[in-house]
Image: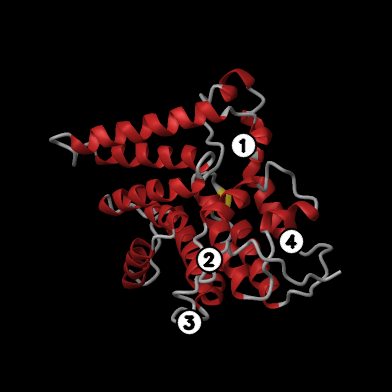
Amino acid sequence: MEWLEHLKIDRRDLTALADAYGAYANVLASAEKNRELLPLTASSRLLSAVYKALVEPRAARDEFRDAARLYWDLKHPYGSVLAVCAEDSETVLQYWNVAQERGGEERSGTDLLSPVIVSCWLSGHPQHRAEYRGILSRVLERSWGLSAITVGRLRLPLRLYLAAVEEISHSSRNPRTPNSGRFKHTIAWLERAAEPVAQAMQDRFHWHRVHSGILPIEPEIVATCVGIVRVLNQGNLRQNLARLLTETNASPLAVIPCEVANNLVDRDESGGSVLSREGELGE
């Protein structure tokens, strides 16, 4: 896959790591005291999903789903991010319902980011968007007051996610908006998310052996891209998101999560990828 050329990682190494972490998670899950090992099992399944997503995105959906359900068992909010990567409606809705019962009480940065990602996905997914119409705008409006707080594993300001999702939501409703400057907030968010990867790649010895402390893709970025793909698809803009961003000067490294998301997103009713159809674009 082209993104492996940009990441400068060998496909065989990623496949070996995905298989190793998946096998390790299986061993841990079968242990007699597996409840005590549940955090390690969940993190191993997560790593298996991340590495597999770079070589076999569609197969990675099962890994993301299993990881999401393990995090659900741990009552950890990060599972909602993984559930969106898997497009696992059951687990996504479980997390959403718990969040509503808590009345918006946030305990961590993930608690702030999760509603944005989940509401983005629910508002764009064809099975859920009618029931959750308007939910994204309400979550965005509520979240802007906390936008300076850093969230997720990358510790990016929440405002970067909010601006990107808001921008994409606007584009889905206004597909003829001129391309110039159209996705500036989305690109700014993705470029910031790519900075740790670009820095880690400078250490060629560890990076090429996939021994870096930085993941090639972060699930929170991929999950947001999955939601964005769904939001774009609900409007009249049905073109490959990564291609659109590349055409507006996004770096190849920054758009990799979009490419992965494009491959993770489920097929629509017509049997084609929701990003495979060309739409009308402003000149």
Work out which residue is located at the far front of the displayed protein and give it.
271
Distance Cα–Cα, label 2 vs label 4: 28 Å
Task: Name the residue at the left extreme.
Answer: 32
Within 10 angstroms of label 4, few (less than 14), some, or many (20 or more) residues? some
Task: Identify residue for label 4.
Answer: 183
For discs 3 and 2, the disc positioned in front in the rendered view: 2
Lower sequence index among marks 1 and 2 = 1
Rounded to the nearest angstrom, the CA distance separating label 4 from label 3 is 26 Å
Q: Earlier in the sequence, mark 3 or mark 2?
A: 3
Choose mark 4 or mark 3, whichever is in front: 3
Q: Earlier in the sequence, mark 4 or mark 3?
A: 3
Few, some or many C-alpha atoms within 10 Å of disc 3 (few <14, some 14-19, many ≥20)? Answer: few
Label ID, residue 196? 1
Amino acid beneath label 4: Phe
Q: Amino acid at mark 2?
A: Gly
Q: Residue at x 58, y 25 (%)?
A: 207
- Between discs 4 and 1, the one toward the N terminus: 4
Left or right of residue 28, residue 95 in this image: right
SS for dot 1: helix
The amino acid type found where label 1 is placed reads Pro
Residue at which label 3 appears: 130
In the visual, does 70 lie left or right of 207?
A: left
Q: Which mark is residue 271?
A: 2
Is residue 230 at all visible to an observer of this figure?
yes
If you read the primary sequence from the N terminus, does the residue marked by circle 2 or circle 4 appear first?
Answer: 4
CB within 8 Å, label 4 to label 1: no
Q: Are marks 3 and 2 in contact (CB under 8 Å)?
A: no
Q: Residue at x 59, y 23 (%)?
A: 208
Image quarter of residue 202: top right
Quarter placement of the C terminus? bottom right
Closer to the observer: label 4 or label 1? 4
